[in-house]
Amino acid sequence: MMKERITEIMLPVTSVVLLLIVWQGVVSLHLIDPFFLPPPSSVVSAAIQLSSNGELERDILISTERALEGYALGSTIGIVVGLAMGTFKTLADIIEPIIEYFRQIPEVAWIPLAILIFGLGGKAVLFIITYGSLWPVLINTYDGVKFVDPLYKRAALSLGADALRMFYKVNLKAALPRIYSGLWISIGIAFRSLVVAELAVATTGVGSGIGYMMNFYYNQYVRTDVLLLGMVILALLGFIAQRGLSVAMKRLLKWLPQF
Amino acid sequence: MSAKPYNGRQKTKIQIQEISHEYFDASRKATLYALRDINITIDEGEFTCIIGPSGCGKTTLLNIVAGFIRPTKGKVLLDGKEIIKPGPDRVMVFQEHALFPWLTVQGNVEFGLEMQGKPKEERKRIAKVFINMVGLGGFEDRYPFELSGGMKQRLGLARSLAVDPEVLLLDEPFASLDAQARRIMQDELLGILGQNRKTSILVTHSIDEAVYLADRLVLLSARPGRVLANEKIELPKPRSRSDVNFVKTVEKYDSIIRMEVNRAEGRNVDNQSAYIGGSDRLSQP
Amino acid sequence: MNPRRIWLRVSGVLVLFGVWWVLSQFQIVNPLFLPGPQVVIASVYENANALLSAFGISLYRLLVGFALGTASGIAIGILVGWVKTLQKTLLPILDMLRSIPNLAWIPIAIVWFGIGNYSKFYVIALAVFFPVMTNAYLGVKNIDPVIIRAAKNFGISTFKMLYKVLLPSAFGDIFIGLKVGLQSGIVAMIATEVVASTAGLGYIMDQASSFFKSGLVIAVMLSIGVLGYFLTQGMVRLEKRYAKWSIRSGES
């Protein structure tokens, strides 16, 4: 049993380590220009270099703050509206066509307008992240409440539940897995909106955050290793955020087999 | 140890009066009758089983009694009062058990009690009684996904009984169990109800099950469902499947249903034929 | 759908338009930020040619990227789903790559392919690849083993197995992946054009924004919405025609 678990973890780890070695080797042996594909070593050294004066930490902090703020704001709006729509059919009928259309306009399409309205700064980025985060949450919450198995409703009615109790003791609980789904997807969207918004703002010369860092160091010093550094950091942040969500929701969702 | 058969002077609990129900069938773009002119009287403490060929409307009838469906014609009276919506006085045990997956065993059983406004301590106490009664003692903190099919069914039963309903409704509760588990559950059900003498209506496909459990057996025809038979089963309980009278009763209903299925498949849908009536009908109370 | 519902749905849209018109007409919101419907429509007329060609360019990039991403996604997804060793070795690497936000690849893509179309193809294909691959992989992994046994019973070669059994069985899941991939692809398309491009819809928005022509920006945004809507509907139609037997309710 133990042996199985060890191999389960070792195999993926080994492949990743192998990949890193091959990657490093291919560049060190000058088979590929380190400009095009910075090896792990230069990514690490870039990290060390940029954190020596606190620059890296600062950019990471700024970006993370934005991402979290936007995510929290967007998710909250999404859940509130989604719940409202799922509960009040009339509201849903009125709003649904609008939502069906607007969800097709991706958050990145708002960037030029957002920059126009909010200027070249964190506000524009925050807006984009909020806008991007709210759609998956809204739609999944709405679907979650809308598609509660009518059997549960019947059982609750049979046992004497009234409308209000029905809502928060049955509909809400039954919709939780779907809401969680939306929240999970939204994390990925939040980070992708973050990087694009920051990049877009950065191309005008000003800005802050990881996207700006990537753009700046490439534009000024042609540092492709910083580009990769940025990518790695974003991936890590996203991963941590998703783990965090999973842990946070675990208590509410422990009745699901997969927990 | 056998229970006494009924005498005729029991209190009337449920009256199903002139129930007809139509519905719109989208695939055939026509209005069909699920049930026609159903009249049944059920006495207090009686265990009634409703059987019939597939599509005869027995589940629809049960849902009407439960209050999930308003019939297009007729009404159902419980203790003289008309039934218009679902409620804990007529709790349903579902075929797909409909257990709340986010609640533990304890939570599920307490649910109805919570709706009744009972305080926490009392809820816990009552729930424990019923959890033990169905044999799930020790599993209070488990979630439904951790239970086996039989255990889920028992949980559904406990949850429904805990609210002390006037009537217990069961929609093919054992259909998803294997043959052995089914028999065990039937005996357990009798054991549990034996202590309570609750008025119950059970819908099933299995004639064997119906004859085993029922004090009163109602047979519905093929769609549109009409009452073909409605008679008391006077065999003493607990019943033995090898008992001669048991076997005869099962055979009798089996052949009626077969004839009914044949007839239904041979005739055309809107023929309100004169077949119903006369010698094919069994004794009516 | 009954008349009441239709009326409700229409009224929502009408109210939205009404509010928009009022806000802009009475300058409640800065007309720079929210120009009125008339301004937007005027922008469309004035720039009709540029818009049309931009549409063409963007759509072209989307389709090429989509095709590349789908083909590679299905191929690799099925392979990884079927071959257990690949699952254990390749999948973790793919998962890692997947956690890098698609759009974070934009700068490096420009380094590799320059600012022209190829960088766009790459990023769009990448955005499409991941959902398609993941769904194809899951679709194959979750095939009822009984079906595989039945197929083997009839003596089927491995290659035939791939496209006569695995592919059709996983089709439903693959379609879900395609739908998600399309959305991701559209996002990637716009993102690459907004950040670094010399042509296309995103580029027009970027330019219009710097010249404060918000009417044009909004016009493009709205038409992107229309584009997305029609493409998605097209997908749904395709699914109904070719995969009707395996439609399940997916997640957004």
Image (cartoon, helix red, strand yellow):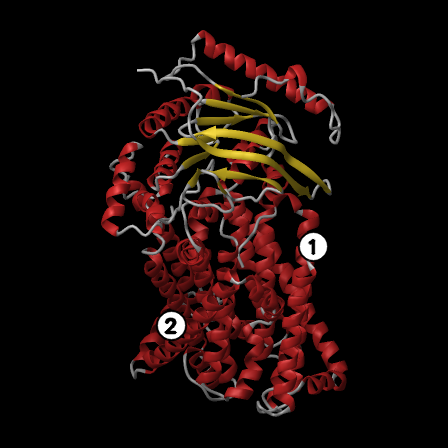
Judge left or right: residue C242 versus residue A176: right
Give the labeled residue for mark 2.
A42
Judge left or right: residue C108 versus residue A2: right
- Subunit of mark 2? A
Above or below for C2 versus A209: above
Say which of marks 1 and 2 sits in front. 1
Mark carried by residue A212 = none
SS label for mark 1? helix
- Quarter location, residue C28: bottom right
Disc 2 crowd rating (10 Å Cα; few below 14, some 14-19, many 20+) is some
Above or below for C193 versus A254: below
Q: Position of residue A46 (x, y in %)?
A: 36, 76
- Say if mark 1 contacts mark 2, CB within 8 Å: no
Query: Residue type at mark 2?
Result: Ser
- Of B130 and B102, nearer the camera is B130
Give the labeled residue for mark 1.
C237
In the rendered image, the quadrant that contains the C terminus of chain B is: top right
